[in-house]
Image: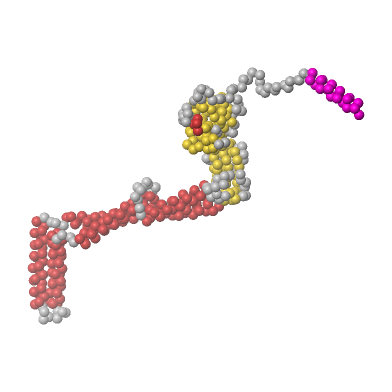
Amino acid sequence: MKRLITVYCLLITLLTACGSSATPTPIPTLVLGSGDATPAPRPVSSGGNVVASAVLVPAQEAHLAFAAGGMVVKVNAKVGDRVTAGYILVELDDTLARLEVERAQRVLRELTSPAAVAAAEQAVANAQEAYDEAKKKAESLNRRFADNVTRDYLEAQVTLAQQALDLAREAYNRTRGLSSADPARAKAAADLYNAQKAYNTALANLNWFTEKPSETEVARITADLNAASAALQEAKWYLAALKGETLPDEASGAQLAQLQQARADLNAAQVRLAQTRLTAPIDGIVAQVDVIAGEYAAPGKVLIVLSNVDQLQVKTTDLSERDVTKVKVGEPAVILIDALNREFSGTVISISPLASVLGGDVVYEVTLVFDEQPVGALAGMTADVRFGEGE
């Protein structure tokens, strides 16, 4: 047993000696890329420069949803499709919306028909005539006081009428004993009636030009004129609206309100019809499609995401509160895109007024534009930004 233990110890000693005398073989280092390319150095804070990490984002991105829900009948786009502004991406069932548009069009068509325009023109003519008559009466209030010649004439007419009335009354009294059927009695009665009527007229004419009109009379004539003026103006506004002319803000009238409501109803119906189609607001590439034909699209649910990846911007992700005060809108910057291993010049266009927290640090988002769009760059690539330097 002791012999076996001794043999094991000798073997362990020999193996240890052999291992300590061997020379280790170095592990080869792999170098990626061509031998001529020299990697651009990552920006570092030195000499007062401000450096921040960033990410490339589309200059425009639209998250599209329907304002009102409905059943999807057609999806015209898939992820990766390039579309232009105005392209219809998704369509809802528009049966009810089309019926509303047709109903509103019929109502407006009736209100603006040639017959309706002719009736409005006749209404303007009638209103003008009523206004002219009311205006004459109102103006006569200011012309009631006659000159002396006219006054003398009117007083003479009253005197003559009074004399004729007295003579007619005396003649009538002389026939008092005759029967009412007697021709002489009948003629005397008729003469007395006519003489009384002529006297009343002469006296009224004199009073009209010599007496001040009463407050009631003035109020009535003024009210009539105001009403006629308002009716004429509303008739003109309505006719102008039928002809498509521009109206002032104070334009009013029951017929005008009805016409404007009909036009508003048609516009609202057309808007609801347009809302059954989800259209592209910008040129771009479809980045996300979350809808299929036959399902219900809930109001406000984002169904399509559209990105303008042809125009990229840069947004910082970790610019600290200590450094953001050193960055100014409009100043130049150098942008190193990690994936391309190249630097590009850019300009600061905005600094977020709101902060966020990253790993316990307060950071602000700064947005930059490239002076020239980088070829080969894609949205989502990371970058480093060195502020305060040109290219």
Residue sitting nearer the eye, 9 or 32: 9
Q: Residue at x 61, y 42 (%)?
A: 289
Vertical relation: 80 (above or below) 204: above
Based on the displayed image, in which of its 4 quarters is residue 116 positioned?
Answer: bottom left
> Does residue 12 belong to the magenta stretch?
yes
Q: Is residue 335 left or right of residue 124?
A: right
4 versus 147 height, above or below: above
Question: Taking the image as drawn, is residue 321 in sight?
Answer: yes
In screen coordinates, is 254 left or right of 270? left
In the rendered image, residue 5, in percent from the top left (x then y), is placed at 88, 27
Specify the quadrant of the image occupied by residue 13: top right
Q: In which quarter of the image is the N terminus?
A: top right
Would residue 133 be visible to someone looking at this image?
A: no
Q: Nearer the viewer, residue 218 or 156?
A: 218
- The span picked out in magenta is 1-21
Relative depth, front residue between 350 and 369: 350
Query: Hey, which residue is sitting farthest front in the picture?
Result: 2
For residue 314, above or below residue 239: above
* Position of residue 119 in the picture relative to residue 77 (left or right): left
Q: Going 13% across and 77% down the picture, which residue do you hit?
A: 185
Numbered marks: total: 0
Between residue 348 and residue 360, name the one nearer to us.
360
Tell me how the rendering is colored.
Answer: secondary structure
Location of residue 176 in the rendering, given as x and y in whole percent from the top left corner: 11, 79
Residue under the image location 53 percent in, 27 percent down:
51
Q: Position of residue 209 (x, y in %)?
A: 14, 59
